[in-house]
Each structure stands twice: as structure tokens, then as C-alpha cells.
Amino acid sequence: MDWCRLTPQQAASELGVDPARGLSAAEAAERLTRHGPNALPRSPAPSVWTLLLRQVTNFIVLLLALAALISFVLGHVADGFAILVALALNVVVGFLMDYRAERDIAALQSLTAPHARVRRDGNVLEV
């Protein structure tokens, strides 16, 4: 159903709600039991090892590792070590950015305190 295309009256009719009275407390409790809370599911934050693995399996990191290996095989040891330093910096910086981003997302999610005004048995409540 394209809910965004419905008028408020059509949506209320589809949901079986009288906009002037709202839901009864019993009907709201029954719908909560039947459908669950109106909340987005939260996925657990990835572990430190997952973040590190994500960096190590990155295409650029794998390409740099291959370039370092080729440099060592061809006898260009200094170039191989230079590439390994670039690879290590790439992994460390990428890991730190991912770690901080995950930590910031978790902090933002904990700051949100969603409230909604609802109509129950003709009275407006904040839940």
C-alpha cells in the first residue's frame, strides 16, 4: 500500500481508526502486542576485530599488499617496505575513522528520545 498517496481520512479508514477519538487504550495495547513497538531495529555495533578485518580486506589494501609482494620478489626491498608503510598507514587511519564513526553513531542513537502525541479515547497523550 502506498500510504503516502492516501489522504489522512483514507489512511485512518484503512487502519480502522476514528481520528476524533483515536484508539481505545485496549485497542492500542492489542495492536502493540500484535505488531510490536513502532521502533527501528538496532543492530549491534561491530566488534573491533570486525572493523579491523573490514580494513584489511579492503580492495586498496589488498592491492598495496600485492604491490609490496611483487616489489620484494623483484628485489626492490626499499620499495616494498615503502609500500608496506603506506599499507599500514591506510589500515590504521581507516580503522580509526570507522571506529570513531561507529562510536559517534552509538552516541547519537542514545541521545534520541522519541516522543509522540497520540489520541487515546478522545484525549491527547504524549508517549
Image (cartoon, rainbow, N blue to C red):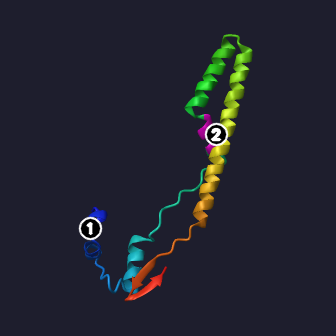
Q: Secondary structure at mark 2?
A: helix
Q: Residue at x 60, y 66 (%)?
A: 111
Q: Indicate which disc residue 112 carries.
A: none
Give the mark, 2 or 1, whose residue is nearer the N terminus.
1
User: Badge 1, how many Cα within 10 Å: few under 14, some, many 20+?
Assistant: few
Magenta stretch: give its range.
51-56
Give how far across and how far down residue 10 sits, in percent.
25, 73
Q: Is residue 47 visible?
A: no
Residue 88 percent across, percent down from the top left: 70, 32
Q: Secondary structure at mark 1?
A: loop
Residue 126 in view in this figure: yes
**Circle 2 crowding by C-alpha within 10 Å: few under 14, some 14–19, many from 20:** some
Magenta span: predominant SS is helix
Placement of 44 over or under 85, stated as above or below: below
Residue 66 in which image quadrant = top right
Give coordinates of residue 126: x percent, y percent: 48, 81
Image quadrant assignment for residue 95: top right
- Residue at mark 1: 6
Identity, as a three-letter code, of the amino acid under mark 1: Leu
User: Nearer the viewer's eye, disc 2 or disc 1?
Assistant: 1
Q: Is residue 19 left or right of residue 104?
A: left
Please count the marks in the image.
2
**Which of the pair 117/120 is nearer the observer?**
117
Label 2 – label 1 distance at C-alpha: 45 Å
Residue 114 against residue 108 in the figure, above or below: below
Which residue was labeled with disc 2?
94
Residue type at mark 2 is Gly
Q: Nearer the viewer, residue 4 or 25?
A: 4
Which residue is the extreme one toward the bottom?
A: 122
Could you tell whether 6 is left or right of 49 in the image? left
Q: Residue at x 55, y 31 (%)?
A: 59
User: Quadrant where the N terminus lies?
Assistant: bottom left
